[in-house]
Image (spheres, rainbow, N blue to C red):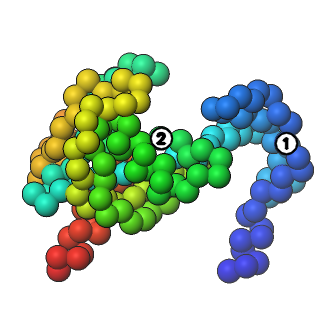
Amino acid sequence: MGEDTERTRWIVHGERLVYDNRWIRLALADVEIPGGERFEHHVVHLKRAAIAVVVDEDDRVLMMWRHRFVADRWGWELPGGLVEAGEDALVTAAREVEEETGYRPKQMEPLLTYQPIAGLVDAEHLLFLARGAEYVGEPTGEVEADLIRWIPMAEIPQMIARGDIWTSGTLIGLYAAREWLSSERA
């Protein structure tokens, strides 16, 4: 396997910064693909993101109804946000749940880690499963959701089919949590 892997590996000769701020870093990578062709490829670097699937004892998941202006589209999403430098991702996920929804998650554990657009964007997403949450007051962060609801897990497949749930972190988080929880019950 190692030999085949090396034959298909792209070689990065360097990277030139095009744009940089606290949210996004855009670069042009000088790459060489198998066969010898060499060219510049856009690369987007983002901070790591932490997302929480908060499930209660009634098998409901805490979700937010939000508008995403880039796609000009509404949908249900899980709470989450960017991991600050030096901050543990689990701490980020818990903080974001509380800031965005007004609920403080109880028992939390890692669920999975993924890259949503691996061919162009370096944006590691860390998903966590929280079992239960306590309401502590109104959301304290910037207004990010029009509605905050506990949605029965049984309704999730129909919501996905209707297009009410469409963002990658939410889709992957819900599918992973459903698998994780059903394997525990088996």
Task: Using the image as rendered, state which of residue 161 and residue 33 is in the foreground.
Answer: 161
Q: Quadrant of the C terminus?
A: bottom left
Residue plotted at (58% across, 52% down) = 87
> What residue would you read off at disc 1?
15
Q: Does label 1 or label 2 sit earlier along the sequence?
A: 1
Task: Identify the element where label 1 is drawn.
Answer: strand
In 3D space, how far apart are the residues under numbered discs 1 and 2 (Cα atoms)? 27 Å
| On screen, residue 161 above or below 89 | above
> What residue would you read off at disc 2?
81
Q: Quadrant of the N terminus?
A: bottom right
1 and 2 marks in contact (CB < 8 Å) = no
Residue plotted at (41% across, 42% down) = 96
Q: Nearer the viewer, mark 1 or mark 2?
A: 2
| Percent of width and height locating residue 109 | 39, 66
The answer to whether 14 appears left or right of 59 in the picture is right
The answer to whether 27 appears left or right of 166 in the picture is right
- Rendered image: mark on residue 29: none
Residue plotted at (55% across, 56% down) = 88
Task: Using the image as rendered, state which of residue 30 and residue 144 is in the foreground.
Answer: 144
Q: Residue flagged by tag 1: what amino acid is it?
A: Glu
| Percent of width and height locating residue 152 | 12, 49
Question: Dot 2 surroundings within 10 Å: few (below 14), some, or many (20 or more)?
Answer: many
Task: Identify the element where label 2 is drawn.
Answer: strand
What residue occupies the far right of the structure in this picture?
13
